[in-house]
Amino acid sequence: MSTVAQLLAQSGLPLLEARMLASHLLEKNSAWLIAHADEALSAKNEQAFAGLAGRRLKGEPMAYILGEREFYGIGFRVTPSVLIPRPETELLVELVLERIPADAAARVLDLGTGSGAIAVAVAKARPQARLTAVDVEYAALVVARENAARHKVKIRFFCGDWFGALPGERFDLIVSNPPYVAAGDAHLAQGDVRFEPQRALLGGADGLDCLRAIVAAAKEHLHAGAWLLFEHGYDQAEACRALLQAQGYGEVQSWPDLAGISRVSGARVSGDIGPLVAQTERNAST
């Protein structure tokens, strides 16, 4: 039988990753692993660790192996049915929260919710808001519902293609992290992306198919003066602003992530603003 130290050293993985897997398997933290470095493991645990390490050596994302990823300071369950939440998407949450008064019952729609990361993060930060989340994949909604229940937030979930499940409904803000990777993009064959659901990544020949659909239809589901915000690829900001301008949105703009890359674009529906939008602007000016 191997000791904890031997198991980590012989895993073939970086020490940090080996410790993460061992902590997950043994349900112990890193401090315990260090303090018990000379402790022998059972044959069962040794075999189980070898299985986890083997998956990682083949390139499988740590988030899928551990079944967990942190986003916006919140732990989320993730499976191969959903994209792995990424730090750059936290910009979307911040932009949403800037536009929702803390004391308002704003109606917010998250399109293509996946793990529910955006919707849950917004719901936790704005408990008065009324969240709706949509995804075309039922398996993704199962994960999203688990995350909502885990964090005790109330969200309406619908299975459907963008606005198809919400005829006639209007919202005070729509947010989305849709598929936007172009078919044939070299990144699809690299890193974690190789293991993620392709339907949640691919946005057509130029990556903009889903964004075109959302931008074209969102106006019929937003109150006047309300915002549409969405994530896109590192080189798509100009094209996304053009889509918004062509559809007659106002205040079209893009925002950079922490790396300085234009990662989110958005705009407002033209027309006389509604009471929620007016309240948001009054709060921002005080």
Image (cartoon, rainbow, N blue to C red):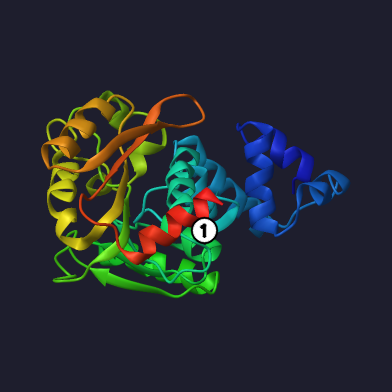
Lateral position of residue 112 relative to residue 74, left or right? left
Residue for point 79% across, 48% down? 33
Callout count: 1
Residue of label 1: 76
Q: Residue at x 22, y 34 (%)?
A: 240
Residue at 27%, 67% (x, y): give it. 138
Question: Alpha-carbon neighbours of circle 1 within 10 Å: few (<14), some, or many (≥20)?
Answer: many
- Give the image location of residue 106, x and y in percent: 39, 67
Q: Is residue 114 visible?
A: yes
Q: Is residue 94 left or right of residue 46?
A: left
Give whichever of 279, 266 is nearer the camera.
Answer: 279
Between 246 and 118, which is closer to the camera in this rendering?
Answer: 246
Question: Residue 255: where, in percent of width, then height?
Answer: 40, 33
Q: Amino acid at mark 1?
A: Phe
In the foreground, 95 or 75: 95
Above or below — where is 245 with respect to 48?
above
Q: Secondary structure at mark 1?
A: strand
Q: Position of residue 93 (x, y in %)?
A: 46, 50
226 or 115: nearer the eye?
A: 226
Q: How far from the left and from the top, in percent, is residue 122?
A: 47, 59
Report whether residue 117 is seen: no
Quadrant of the rendered image containing residue 124: bottom right
